[in-house]
Amino acid sequence: MANSNLATYRNPTRNHSGGRTQKISKITPHEMAAIWSGRQCADYFAGTTRQASSNYCIGNGGDIAISVDEGNRAWTSSSEYNDQRAVTIEVSNSVCGGDWPVSPAAYNALVRLCADICKRNGINPAYNGAASGSITMHKMFASTACPGPYLTHKIVSGDLARDIKAAMGQGTAKPVSQQLYRIRKSWADVKSQIGAYKSLENAKKACGVGYSVFDKDGKAVYTPGGSAAKKWTQDCVLKVGDKVISVSCGIVAVPGTNSAVQGNLVNIPALGGMVPLSDVSEADDTGDGKKDDYLANTKSRVFLLQATVTKIISNDLVQLDRGYVVKTGPLMGLR
Ligand SMILES: [Zn+2]
């Protein structure tokens, strides 16, 4: 079975199970939790006695290295089921902490590599929230934050699947014009537009009093001398359409067990009960400097990743776009 021609380096590790027993049918992007080149990561997997590896490693600068040949089952996702079927890809972070972002170069390399894998293996890239889908996440199978908030959002929002399809020559990439920063009196007042800039800094310089700079989604990102940028605020009256995240909340063992995690759900009483693992991230490190073990530890605190309010149920209950109802107490809206 062939590897991707996009790889520029190969350092095979012994950390794998040999040939796959299942056809390749999915892709699992992981966060490296380090700022490395792809080569450094492949070298690490080749040299470590830790039982860890991935098929590909993508560096912060966008280089692609092979650690486990595509035809072999890597040890990446804590799941025999997944790793027999998935091409696993470690992606370097650009910052270790916060949202655990990845660089544009690394993300673009991920998109190109996934497009190549999907084409060669006849995969239709799509995230459906289930292990059976063609894009999966490590945290579906283990108590881990991997692939971290940034990549989780890219995956759950459908952005990654859409970008891969565009790179495969299917679907449509975002038109370049959508990436512009527009200067208008209000987003709705299209005729008031006095300029559109690729650079936010240039847009800010050109934006006079009475105008604001709007991003591609129509959100005001700069208003000279005007109102301060909106901040995440707790205890605000929520309405349908509000974007929300939560303050950090404790996780509590499910009654009758010694774990807060049950299947793909985690018990967060402040939010009203069981919440999908894919929708939360670690709020505070549990003390070991790693973000990989927090759900195994009921002392951990987590926060709800950004969601949109779709229905007001009562004063203290709202439904989110991801389908479930949560208590409003820990929620913060932009105000
Ligand atoms: Zn992972």
Image (cartoon, rainbow, N blue to C red):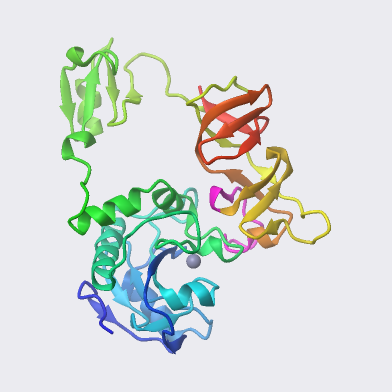
Residue in the picture at 33% in, 59% down: 125
Q: Is residue 233 visible?
A: no
Q: How many marks?
A: 0
Residue 251: within the magenta?
A: no
**Overall secondary structure of the magenta stretch?**
loop
Q: Is residue 324 visible?
A: yes
Residue in the picture at 35% in, 73% down: 56
Residue in the picture at 51% in, 24% down: 240
Q: Position of residue 141 (x, y in %)?
A: 56, 66
Q: Position of residue 211 (x, y in %)?
A: 27, 14
| Above/below status of 52 relative to 240 | below
The stretch of residues the image draws in magenta is 278-293
| Above/below status of 18 relative to 285 | below
Residue in the picture at 37% in, 82% down: 68
Viewer-closest of 147 and 208: 147
Q: Position of residue 7 (x, y in %)?
A: 24, 74
Viewer-closest of 76 and 83: 83
Q: Determine which quarter of the picture holds residue 144.
A: bottom right
Quarter that holds the N terminus: bottom left
Left or right of 47: which side holds 318?
Answer: right
Q: Residue furthest top?
A: 210
Q: Position of residue 176 (x, y in %)?
A: 17, 39
Residue 292: within the magenta?
A: yes
| Above/below status of 267 relative to 2 | above
